[in-house]
Amino acid sequence: MGVRLSTCAVVCALFAAHAHSAVGASSEQPGAAQTGHADVRVRLSLPNAPKDHHIPAIIWLESTDGSTPPPFLPHPRYTLLQKNRMFMPHLLVVPVGATVSFPNADPFFHNVFSLFDGKRFDLGLYEAGSSKDVHFTREGVSYIFCNIHPEMSAVVVSLSTPLYSVNDGDSFDVHDVPPGDYTLHLWVEGVPGRALEPLGHPLHVATTTLDLGELHVPVTPERSMSHTNKFGMPYTPTTKPAY
């Protein structure tokens, strides 16, 4: 046990040094000690990020000390609505095992599919006023598209832990984190996963607020994700959509 604590101490010291070099300080501050849990704060630095365009991003904490993550809060229904040739919301985070409904609120057909990473599915054509469901059975990032309308896109992130935060501007706050050892994971839309992997960090959470400083993303996010249709072919250009 003494060796394990010593190793964790070295890792935490290295991570604190990294954050200090990024923003000039990395500090644990009083905040959640009265509950026995902590808050984890991170800021995101994106090169050449457009000021007029919000770039969705998520951080989450994966336990590495064998502890069981807390449960997700009860949620009656997860929905990704199709309306005005858009998915609403654009980004949806769900627990592993959740069912997501895809109702069509447009007065024309849609064909929702996902064949890229995460959950692979094809809901086929379905008409206005109808809905179909998808069961997300494992962790992953699922990029959602419509086979008829190439401008439609969304992302479903399925996690096995509720210890996550969606960015508010350039900042993240993960609340009520139990003390323990974790790995920090990051996803940013438009940035390849291989570019984000080095930003994952081991960290130790105590009973005080932990400020990790800035995470510097090494590449500029793509404004829009290029993709093919569900057959792996380019969309047929049209001057007026058929639906």
Image (spheres, grey):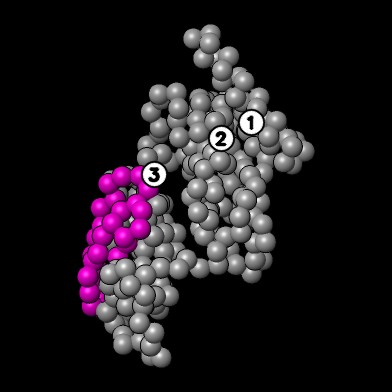
Look at the image and say whether residue 124 sits in the magenta stretch.
Answer: yes
Dot label at residue 159:
3
Dot label at residue 15:
1
**Mark 1 secondary-structure assignment:** helix
Is residue 175 among what the camera can see?
no
Q: Please tell me whether residue 156 is drawn above or below residue 200 in the rendered image.
A: below
Magenta stretch: give its range. Answer: 113-140
Q: Please tell me whether residue 113 is drawn above or below residue 9 in the rendered image.
A: below
**Mark 3 secondary-structure assignment:** strand
**Location of residue 71 (image quadrant):** top left
Circles 1, 2 touching at the beta carbon (< 8 Å)? yes
Q: Please tell me whether residue 2 is drawn above or below residue 47 in the rendered image.
A: above
Circles 1, 3 touching at the beta carbon (< 8 Å)? no
**Which residue position holds label 2?**
201
* Coordinates of residue 103 in the picture (x, y in percent): 29, 69
In the image, what residue type sits under mark 3? Leu
Considering the whole magenta stretch, tell me its main secondary structure: loop
Q: Residue furthest bottom?
A: 239
User: What residue is rendered at 38% in x and 28% in y?
Assistant: 68
Is residue 168 among what the camera can see?
yes
Q: Mark 1, residues whose alpha carbon is within 10 Å: few (<14), some, or many (≥20)? A: some
Between the residue at mark 1 and the residue at mark 3, the CA separation in whole angstroms equals: 24 Å
